[in-house]
Amino acid sequence: MNDYKRLISFIKPYWKRLGLAIICIIMSAAANLYVPWIIKDMVDKVLMNKDMMLLNLIAAGIVVVFLFRGIFYYGQSYLVSYIAQRVIIDVRELLYIKFQKLQLGYYEKKQTGTIMSYITNDVAALQAALVDSLIEMVTELSILIGSLIMMFYLDWKLSIVTLVVVPVIGQAMKIFGRKLKQSGALIQERTAEITSLLQESISGVRVVKSFAREDYEIERFQNQNNLNFKANMKSVQLSSLLTPTVEFLAAVIVAVILWFGGYQVVNGALTAGALVAFLTYAVNLANPVKRISRVYGTINKAMAAAERVFNVLDTEEKLKDKPNAIELPKISGDVQFDHVSFGYKKDVDVLHDLTLEAKPGQVIAFVGPSGAGKSTIANLIPRFYDVTAGSIKIDGIDIRDVTIRSLREQIGVVPQETMLFSGTVKDNIRYGRLDATDEEIIEAAKAANAHNFIMHLADGYETKIGERGITLSGGQRQRIAIARAILKNPRILILDEATSALDTESEEIVQEALDKLMIGRTSFVIAHRLSTIINADKIIVLDNGKVTESGTHKELMQTGGLYSHLYNIQFSDKKAK
């Protein structure tokens, strides 16, 4: 119920339209309540007294009433649908904004397909609860309340006898509603799992085909599809039981009316027309109860989706600006790690008491075996994560004391796995600085050794490159990423194994572009191929999250430590090839 109240709270900005919609719904329902009264007058006055004047008035009244009913019905449908669609858009935007603000750790724990399912499948389920269900719920409640009033006006004794069974119906709806909500939650989970599986298999189609695992993926999908089928059939089973249960109880009401009402007509306590009208109102009473039970089931299933959506919205943003955070002024690029420790999990540190300094314009390289903590350092400088102990300072300012936006605007990152968007080449380069001119984009591309290959593309800078830049080679994608970083013109640069996935020819071209990019910037290079960092001002050797060696290439080769060992292995492999 709290989730539904919260969902309804999204309607508040549109309360004027909601008020008009409710008026339209009530007036439309009132037209339905007029029909039984017409039947009463037809039986008791027109048929008994052969009153033609009254018959003419009734006929004209029906036409007028249903004309207005059509107008009010249009009003209710349009207004409620408008409100519902606006609420869905608002919820979807809130979710998207939330996803943009959540830290990287959230995405590392959630599958992409699951996150997509929140915005697509779960929000679509909310739409069903707000559009169809809300209209039907208010309409049927209006008919229900109106029918009850008219029933008591016609015969209060018969009304009381009729309503004895209502609490039983309410209890049945409560039991089924709880089970339907649980079933709805399972359906949303199964749907999210299917979306995740689809996302994985489609994005990884090259791997699937290279291992000839099409049959395996088909079997995985069939298994997941069957689980989704079972979850849906469980919900269908509950819904199918709810409606006949309510209908049976409604039939009991009708039987009571026929017996007790007929008894009163025989004894002269009630007219035949009044009994027919009462019975019609009772049917009007039974139909809303039945429909409300169905709507109640739909809403409970939708609330499972609402719960998932609100869980996301309520997720704590562990990484956010301090209340008194300042804008980071333009920096020179002096970076200090002061006894920094960090762990992705509580009490499990990846970095241990790391202390180092990078002077403005220096190139600092990090090397070491896998899992040594190199990429973790790259994540800490732009505050993708916060240190668990110690501090990182830029130009003497603790990065936790400045706004995240102002910090990241002065840091450029070129990762190993280049992420390009599905727009044009120009759009992807301009992502580095959205107000850049076409001339500035071209200059950045030239500096990244990308201009020549771009001009050979079908539409040059206007060429659409497909999802994740699939139409380009690895080296081409990396050069566009470098052009994007050059356009941003950051004072601090982070290169996270930016050439490790490239062939030798592409690596040489990209490395030349990177060398240009690093000029005059404080650069942190995470290196896999040690030949690319020979000229670094300082090389930091990490092992198990600790600094084991530090110095220039020449100094480290002379010490004969881990760096010398790693370099000799790579050099020997290169000679062997």
Image (spheres, rainbow, N blue to C red):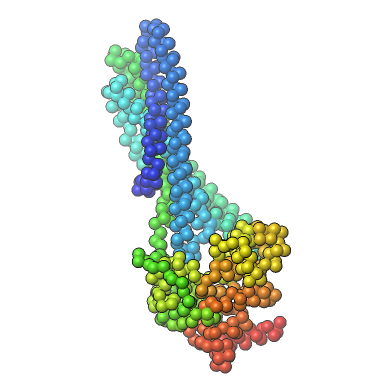
Q: Quadrant of residue 275?
A: top left
- The C terminus, quarter of image: bottom right
Total count of labels: 0
- Please give the name of the residue rendered at 47% of the width and 52% of the height, measured from the top-left corner: 93
Q: Is residue 541 above or below residue 500?
A: below
Q: Is residue 363 above or below residue 466?
A: below
Q: Where is residue 196 shown, x and y percent of the image?
A: 54, 57
Q: Along the horizontal axis of the image, is 361 left or right of 386? A: right
Q: Is residue 474 above or below residue 175?
A: below
Q: Along the horizontal axis of the image, is 475 left or right of 326? A: right
Q: Quadrant of residue 450?
A: bottom right
Q: Quadrant of residue 513?
A: bottom right
- Please give the name of the residue rendered at 39% of the width and 78% of the height, measured from the top-left corner: 390
Instruction: Looking at the picture, tell me which residue is in the foreground, 443 or 337.
Output: 443
- Please give the name of the residue rendered at 57% of the width and 57% of the height, measured from the top-left corner: 199
Q: Where is residue 392 shown, x and y percent of the image?
A: 42, 76
Q: Along the horizontal axis of the image, is 515 left or right of 187? A: right
Q: Is residue 451 visible?
A: yes
Instruction: Looking at the picture, tell me which residue is in the foreground, 396 or 96.
Output: 396
Q: Where is residue 109 shown, x and y percent of the image?
A: 48, 64
Instruction: Looking at the picture, tell me which residue is in the foreground, 87 or 161.
Output: 87
